[in-house]
Image: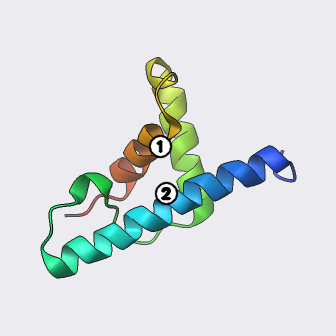
Amino acid sequence: MQDSDRHGICVGYIAGIGDLMHAFGNYSQSQDVNVRAFSICGNASYGAMVQAFVDWAAANPQKWSENYLFGVAEALRVNWPCR
């Protein structure tokens, strides 16, 4: 599975959202801007981000019909919240 195109697309999608949310987290910390809904803090590998989403998806099948972006963002926020 990890050598498949689908896996690469999945990792790239989650990594892109994670990188953006991490940038928002850094910005909100330094600028006192309220962008918490779009922020994560701390350090997370792309593999950890993917696993967080996989775990979130398994625990939330009722949300599978929603846009992927919302699920990834929620999974990452739960695991790497900004305090």
Q: Nearer the viewer, residue 69 or 48?
A: 69
Q: CA distance from mark 1 to mark 2?
A: 8 Å
Is residue 63 placed above or below 68 in the rendered structure? Answer: above
The residue positioned 49% from the left and 57% from the top of the image is: 17
Callout 1: helix, strand or loop? Answer: helix
Amino acid tagged 1: Leu
Marks 2 and 1: in contact by CB < 8 Å? yes
Crowdedness near tag 2: few (<14), some (14–19) or many (≥20) residues, C-alpha within 10 Å = some
Is residue 59 placed above or below 20 in the rendered structure? Answer: above
Crowdedness near tag 1: few (<14), some (14–19) or many (≥20) residues, C-alpha within 10 Å = few
Left or right of residue 17: residue 10: right
Point out the image quarter for the C terminus. Answer: bottom left
> Which residue occupies the extreme bottom position in the image?
30
The residue positioned 48% from the left and 33% from the top of the image is: 67
Give residue 17's mark: 2
The residue positioned 58% from the left and 48% from the top of the image is: 51
Q: How far across and how far down the image is residue 43, in percent?
A: 44, 72
Q: Where does label 1 land, which residue?
A: 69
